[in-house]
Amino acid sequence: MNRLKFREEIILLIFFFFISDFTFSQSLIVGMPSIDVAEPRHLEITHETQINLWEKPTKWNSFNFACYGLGHEAELTTTLNNLSNEGSSNLALGIGVKKILPLVRENNYWQSKVGLGGNIQYSTARGNAGIWTYAIYSLQHPKTKTRLTAGLNYGQSQTFGFRQRVENGVSILEPNNTTSFILGFEQPIYHNISLIGDWYSGNHDLAAFIPALQIDIKKHVLILGYKFPNSKENGNQAVIAEFMFSIPANSNK
């Protein structure tokens, strides 16, 4: 592992949390955008760890998010993706926005919403920029509170990584610019505990199914899950741990 490069990534992580007070992450189910946004004038900061201890060498990767609620069903977002113990060559900083459009609000009907969002992603290693955009549609049952979300997203290499092909015996990395389906579910099962999960289709860095338990702790959230990649090409299986804490923007805590 390149210790100097890893040290630079840690500095970027500290810088990311510093700027989160001024530019604000994507509210997620586990790994895909949810139909929720941060409360108005609240800052939500999330750290997600993915770790595999049973294969050598140990694999650790993380995604870091911060979002600021603007009100009117919108939020500003920042991200720091692919901070890992291997000195990731695809570390990326992002900034963007998400807007939710309620369609049906009545309590006696399936509540439905549309979500639109996008991010500009900058690769710190390669010095180039790309985009990640998505559109989602969500339905929630009024009694069971079952919520189903589906949509499409388009991302470039800063989000989806690279694919490898061999030409004349030479291995070549190509940017994985692609469109994929996203599916998610959320089901409260007991007081503050919910069963959740999401899935990206395709063959890229995010292509996986992740079932998880979500535990709400007042306004904070703990998520524990397991990652099943679509194929070995998309990485290893991993344990997922995610924690989100929410604070008012003017809080001194």
Image (cartoon, rainbow, N blue to C red):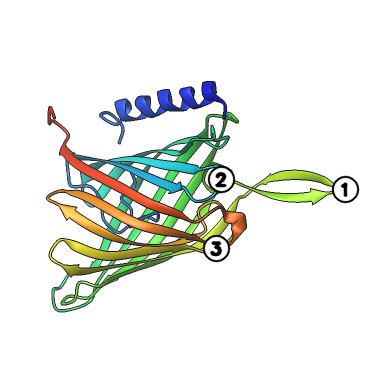
Where does residue 185 sit, x and y in percent of width and height?
33, 68
Quarter occupied by the C terminus? top left
Residue 230 numbered tag? 3
Residue 168 numbered tag? 1
Per the model, the C-alpha gap separating discs 3 and 1 is 28 Å
Of tags 2 and 3, the one toward the viewer is 2
The crowding category of the residue bearing disc 3, from other C-alpha atoms within 10 Å (few below 14, some 14 to 19, many at least 20), is: many
The crowding category of the residue bearing disc 1, from other C-alpha atoms within 10 Å (few below 14, some 14 to 19, many at least 20), is: few
**Residue drawn at x 41%, y 42% as measured from the top left:** 63
Instruction: Tell me whether circle 3 and circle 1 mark residues in contact (CB < 8 Å).
Output: no
For numbered disc 2, what is the local secondary structure?
Answer: loop
Per the model, the C-alpha gap separating discs 1 and 2 is 30 Å
Q: Which residue is mark 2?
A: 56
Q: How many marks?
A: 3
The crowding category of the residue bearing disc 2, from other C-alpha atoms within 10 Å (few below 14, some 14 to 19, many at least 20), is: few
For numbered disc 3, what is the local secondary structure?
Answer: loop
**Which amino acid type corresponds to the residue marked 2 in the rendered image?**
Lys
Quarter-wise, where is residue 89 in the image?
top right
